[in-house]
């Protein structure tokens, strides 16, 4: 579904835009994704809307066939991209699973703020972004996906999420479209 509206209490969730992940080879340049996510974060803050910055700090337990490549090698790996300009009022979530809601208290935090909609951006489209969007949808949030403020290491996986999965979870739009709705809705 094309982007139509933003609820009065919409939160931005930025997935895994940290130094180590931003260094991965991605379908779309990570620096452009970070710049768009930073523009969204600045706009949300100007309107006193919640900004959630999510970082991955490990993996879920259990066996998998495909090992994760290029994991943490230094403390800098975990640092948020400086362009996001983390502010004291931002809520930071450290996760150990693909999605930002599992065992993090994010649902409770958003509920306490009266949030009814989330805008999601970040890396990687088919894992962290999609998992967070699926969970948000299941929890009853209206979901918007900033499709030009996300990327993946796999072009087919990125395209599948954007074309086939996201339209079933919510609305999709560009950063410019989301910013225009914020400007129109908030004057």
Image: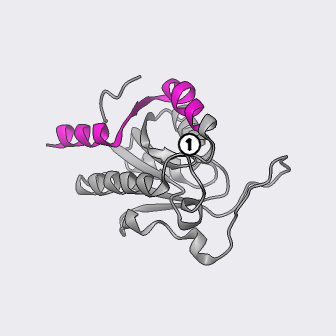
User: In the drawing, does residue 85 fall left or right of residue 180?
Assistant: right
The extreme left residue here reads 187
**Residue 106: x %, y % from top left:** 52, 52
Question: Quick check: 112 above or below 2?
Answer: below
Q: Nearer the viewer, residue 173 or 185?
A: 173
Magenta span includes 91: no
Colouring:
one colour
- Residue at x 31%, y 27% (from the top left corner): 4
User: In the drawing, does residue 126 fall left or right of residue 147?
Assistant: right
- Residue at x 63%, y 44% (from the top left corner): 127
- Residue at x 70%, y 64% (from the top left corner): 71
Question: Quick check: 78 above or below 11?
Answer: below
**Residue 36: x %, y % from top left:** 37, 51
Q: Is residue 8 visible?
A: no
User: In the drawing, does residue 162 fall left or right of residue 63?
Assistant: left
Location of the C terminus (image quadrant): top left
Q: Nearer the viewer, residue 26 or 45?
A: 26
Residue topped by disc 1: 125
Question: Quick check: 2 above or below 120?
Answer: above
> Magenta-highlighted stretch: main secondary structure?
helix
Location of the N terminus (image quadrant): top left
Q: How many marks?
A: 1
Question: Quick check: 24 above or below 12?
Answer: below
**Residue 152: x %, y % from top left:** 58, 46
- Residue at x 61%, y 48% (from the top left corner): 153
Q: Secondary structure at mark 1?
A: helix
Mark 1 Cα-neighbour bin, 10 Å: few <14, some 14–19, many ≥20: many
**Residue 140: x %, y % from top left:** 49, 32
The boundaries of the magenta stretch are 158-187
Q: Is residue 113 visible?
A: yes
């Amino acid at each position: 579904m094309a982007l139509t509206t933003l609820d009065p209490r919409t939160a931005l969730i930025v997935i895994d835009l940290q130094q180590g992940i931003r260094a991965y080879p991605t379908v779309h340049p990570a620096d452009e994704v970070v710049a768009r996510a930073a523009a969204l974060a600045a706009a949300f803050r100007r309107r006193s809307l919640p900004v959630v910055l999510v970082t991955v700090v490990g993996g879920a337990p259990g066996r998998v066939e495909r090992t994760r490549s290029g994991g943490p090698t230094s403390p800098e790996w975990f640092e948020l991209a400086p362009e996001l300009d983390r502010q004291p009022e931002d809520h930071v979530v450290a996760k150990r699973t693909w999605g930002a809601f599992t065992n993090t208290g994010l649902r409770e935090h958003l509920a306490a703020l009266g949030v009814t909609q989330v805008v999601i951006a970040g890396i990687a489209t088919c894992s962290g972004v999609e998992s967070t969007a699926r969970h948000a949808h299941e929890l009853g949030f209206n979901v918007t996906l900033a499709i030009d403020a996300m990327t993946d290491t796999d072009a087919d996986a990125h395209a599948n999420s954007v074309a086939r999965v996201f339209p079933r979870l919510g609305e999709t739009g560009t950063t410019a479209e989301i910013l225009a709705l914020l400007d129109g809705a908030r004057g």
